[in-house]
Image: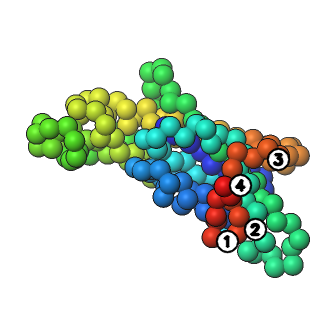
Amino acid sequence: MIVQISAGQGPAECSIGVEKLCDSLMKEFENGKVLSVNRDYSGYGYRSAILEFDSDISFLEGTILWICKSPVRSEHKRKNWFMDLSILKEPQNDITLDLKDVRFETMHCGGKGGQHVNKVETGVRLRHIPTGITIECTEERSQFQNKSRAVKKLEAVLEAVNEESVRNSVKDARKKHTGITRGNPIRIYEGMDFRLRK
């Protein structure tokens, strides 16, 4: 499952929250991978991040609230910082990505799957040269299937990056956070140690 966490058009504190949420989810769910990050222009945190999980975390889709005194503006009175977590759909159609821009490597999968999986290089790692995005796929028993899955994942990530670029180009025409609805958060975290409120 591929997810995107976004600070929308929130301030630097929201970007710090995105980075903290990434770290928290990577600890909470096994086999998580960070596929790409878009760092905040201020130098604090991530404007957005795209992650992949083996687990189904669709129950987290929606608004995430972080309650914390601003770590960058000591006199600032606001303590509520909002982020958005969205599930990205993997494309079902044939890909239109130019594979000349992709470098492929094969690797041993390891783990479960018997002697065939461990001895033959069925795993695939690809790198999209223009963006530097790297995707690994080892779920399937054949190299061909892993390559196909990896390319689909890359297309989903690139589509999200393109959509964000379009949003950024029209952000001054929008008056609210992109994709973020305040109120009724799915989860609430508190403090600089990012404790999950039970």
The residue pinned by badge 1 equals: 192
The residue pinned by badge 3 equals: 182
- The residue under the point 48% across, 20% down is 93
Choose the circle earlier in sequence order: 3 or 2: 2
Give the spatial CA distance, label 3 vs label 2. Answer: 16 Å
- The residue under the point 80% across, 76% down is 73
Proximity of marks 2 and 1: CB atoms separated by less than 8 Å: yes
Circle 1 packing at 10 Å, graded few (<14), some (14-19), many (20+), is: some
| Nearer the camera: disc 1 or disc 4 | 4
Give the spatial CA distance, label 1 vs label 4. Answer: 13 Å
Circle 4 packing at 10 Å, graded few (<14), some (14-19), many (20+), is: some
Choose the circle earlier in sequence order: 2 or 4: 2
Choose the circle earlier in sequence order: 2 or 1: 2
Q: Say which mark, if any, is on residue 68.
A: 2
Give the spatial CA distance, label 2 vs label 1. Answer: 7 Å
| Nearer the camera: disc 2 or disc 4 | 4
Q: Is residue 98 visible?
A: no
**What percent of the width, then of the height, locates residue 182?**
82, 47
Give the spatial CA distance, label 4 vs label 3. Answer: 12 Å
